[in-house]
Image (cartoon, helix red, strand yellow):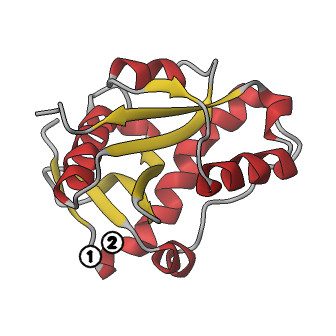
Amino acid sequence: MPVKIRSAVAADLPHLERIENEADSLLVDLLQPDHWHPAPTDAERLADGGIILVAEGEDGAVVGFVHVLEFDGGAHLEQVSVLPAFGGRGIGRALVEAAKDAARESGYARLTLRTFAEVPWNAPFYASAGFVIEEPADDFHRMLVETEERLGLERFGPRVQMGVDLSGSH
């Protein structure tokens, strides 16, 4: 299924919450948490700012998205979600590559993320896209670790930070 990756527009925002919640259902099924925090609302996501790209199918429907946060001198891949019905078609990979391109075009030398180390479509997937495990080295990333600890995410498996150098890509 060919998809078009483009910048999100206001009309796309209400779809992103549903897409993330549906995509998260795969993680919920795997991890079996008692409670899982729902995706941010469109207003919350918009308030976070950054770069939001969507994957649009042939029929014009949004089937996935990526959200890159911009922080003091850096870019952080906050979320990649694809509707489960469209999984396994390379859409997630296309979104990650587009996020890397957008971050590079915005002047960032690196793109980071935090994810589960042992979930196949998390750290192993990102490693196949060029990301490598690294230690949190600044206040932004240490804040993310503290948030994960406060939420108790480690009970579902180890979390890692990964990053990719954008200067040598494409």
- Classify mark 2: residues with Cα within 10 Å, few (<14), some (14-19) or many (20+): some
Q: Amino acid at mark 2?
A: Asp
Q: What residue appears at the point 72 percent right and 45 percent down from the top-left corner? A: 145
Mark 1, residue position = 9
State the mark number for residue 31: none
Q: What residue appears at the point 26 percent right and 44 percent down from the top-left corner? A: 100
Q: Is residue 121 visible?
A: no
Helix, strand, or loop for circle 1?
A: loop
The answer to whether 151 appears left or right of 43 in the picture is: right
* Quadrant showing the C terminus: top left
State the mark number for residue 12: 2
Report if the CB atoms under discs 2 and 1 are less than 8 Å apart: yes
* Quadrant showing the N terminus: top left
Count every numbered label the image shows and give the total. Answer: 2
Q: What residue appears at the point 79 percent right and 39 percent down from the top-left corner? A: 153
Label 2 to label 1, Cα distance in Å?
Answer: 5 Å
Q: Quadrant of residue 44?
A: bottom right
